[in-house]
Image: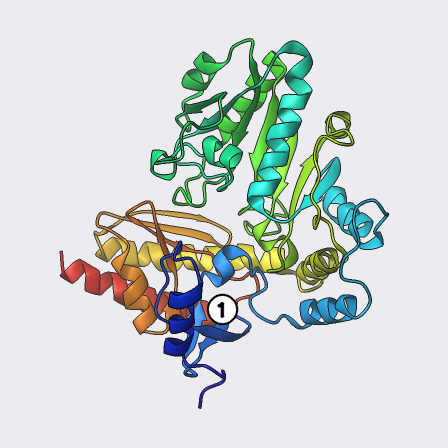
Amino acid sequence: MSIANLNSQSTIDLFDQYVIPNYRRYPVSLVKGEGSRVWDAEGRSYLDLFPGWGCNILGYSAPALVKAIQDQAATLIHVPNTWYIEQQGRFAEFLCSRSFGKAFFCNSGAEANEAAIKLARLHGSAEGRFRMITFEKGFHGRTLGALTATAQPKYHEGLGPLMAGFRYAAMNDLEGVASLIDDETCAIMIEPIQGEGGVRIPEPEFLQGLRNLCDQHGLLLIFDEVQTGMGRTGEWFAYQHTTVQPDVMTLAKGLAGGVACGAMITRDEFAGDLRPGMHASTFGGNSLAMAAGIATGETIEREGLLQHVVDNAEFVRQQLEQVQQSLPIIKELRICGMMIGIDLTIPSAPAVGKAMERGVLLNATQDTVVRLLPALNITREELEQGLEIVVSVLEEMAEDV
């Protein structure tokens, strides 16, 4: 029985007529979700190992999140930032008491990174500093500033001239980074784990080396934790796996459990650089998103999901390492919490369609990487089921080599 008014094809027809075709979409209309499962318009169920592109960090329809959104929507959805907003203050307290500094709220990861770029330039403006160093295969967003920070030429095609002042370095090459620093450099921006880049994890000593370079040259160290934040890695924030604390951290995706929300957090001594009139976000920090964020964070703590993520990550590692021994197309496993990258010796894109046919949703990135971002509260049984299908897909792909 269909659980939607329109079947998938009817929705596709509407899109063909009225929606700009700037996304590559699979010919399926998803209409309902619960936990780590989602249903299409024809009533078929899928186990989603990549829910909401990592935004649905509690899966679909988490009860506490749904209730918080319903209650807040019935009370107050939005007022502008010319007034004090209780929920914004409470969510800022929640985040900063588990990290550092002060928070600015916006609606997306790209916006959070734009705020960080502005903050770094404002901080360096008195000394004429405006250049930033970012890293190959990184991804920071689609707006022009964040896109220029993204050191992947494929995203730049047809959009030049790009914003001036960015230099690109190779990850784990500290000497190469040092060679790019000059008197006009104001900041270094890096993902503590590259997500779209294929779940690439920097060496801990490299991150410490960046911290040392920033301290030596008076630069801001910015961590883009848009994908890694809010418990994704088994810590509240990925920097907490290291001895390095950034000066600025950007957040989004899972921050409010799937409701549009972004944030930039900066150390107290730099917060004043983003002075009134220099940056704003009309919908940023609205009551609805903040209530969703508070409910998401409180659910993670109440249900002990950080430890759940650590335990499940070890289970996934053990399972995939066993498979790797007998499946030579698996070149490398990169796992940190519920960030899972399976780097293949062959193109990874066919895995998405093959898995979807078997009722599992996943992602392929960087040509050869199968990427999974399961919900933090996914059950062990669901992980077992999902991994069994992923492995069957990889085995089939290996036979075709």
Left or right of 283 in this view: 354: left
Residue 202 in view, yes or no:
yes
Q: Nearer the viewer, residue 254 or 141?
A: 141
Q: Nearer the viewer, residue 136 or 118?
A: 118
Tell me: residue 213, above or below residue 159. above
Q: Which amino acid does label 1 sit on?
A: Arg
Residue farthest to the bottom, as pictured: 1
Q: Residue 96 at x, y = what percent?
A: 74, 42
Q: Nearer the viewer, residue 9 or 397?
A: 9
Q: In which quarter of the image is the N terminus?
A: bottom left
**Occupied quadrant, residue 189:** top right
Look at the image and name its color scheme.
rainbow
Q: Residue 57 at x, y = what percent?
A: 57, 59
Q: In which quarter of the image is the C terminus?
A: bottom left
Residue in the picture at 68% in, 60% down = 296
**Occupied quadrant, residue 289:** bottom right
Residue in the picture at 41% in, 83% down = 42
Residue farthest to the front, as pictured: 17
Q: Name the residue under label 1.
A: 380
Tell me: residue 284, above or below residue 266. below
10 Å crowding of disc 1: few (<14), some (14-19), many (20+): some
Residue in the picture at 42% in, 24% down = 168
**Occupied quadrant, residue 349:** bottom left
Residue 244 in view, yes or no:
no
Helix, strand or loop at mark 1: helix
